[in-house]
Image: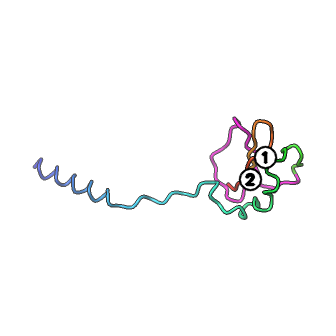
Amino acid sequence: MRRNTFWGIAGLLALTACQSPAPQPEAPGDLPPAQCGADRLQDRIGAPLARFDQADWPESHRVEAPGSLQTMDFRPERLRIQTDAAGTITALLCG
């Protein structure tokens, strides 16, 4: 009985090793920049964030400064504005 159980488990393990991995969701930075408008705003990278008013950004946006807390929700239409410690825009991404 134990021998049959061993071979049964070994067979199942061998079959599961042959399966392809589950597809991974898109990472926030992997989205096309046109989905959130980041493609039209790339000229702002390197500029100080303080130079722009709230009205200069899409309605759905979030500023990500170093050390700031962020939620883990994923919204492809949201513009993510990443800054360095000095407040300079370093990246514009969707998510």
Q: Is residue 73 magenta?
A: yes
Residue count near mark 1 (Cα–Cα under 10 Å), binned few <14, some 14–19, many ≥20? many
Query: x%, y% of residue 91?
Result: 73, 50
Q: Nearer the viewer, residue 57 or 85?
A: 85
Residue annotated with mark 2: 92
Specify the amino acid type for callout 1.
Ile
Q: CA distance from mark 1 to mark 2?
A: 8 Å
Query: At 76% from the left edge and 36% from the top edge, which residue is drawn?
Result: 85
Quarter in which the C terminus is drawn = bottom right
Could you tell me if the residues under marks 1 and 2 are in contact, i.e. CB atoms within 8 Å? yes
Magenta stretch containing residue 14, yes or no?
no
Q: Is residue 22 left or right of residue 58?
A: left
Amino acid type at circle 2 is Leu
Q: Can you give x and y, in whole percent of width and height, for residue 3 in the image? A: 11, 49
How far from the left and from the top, in percent, is residue 73? 64, 49
The number of numbered badges drawn on the structure is: 2
What is the magenta range? 55-79
Q: Which residue is mark 1?
A: 89
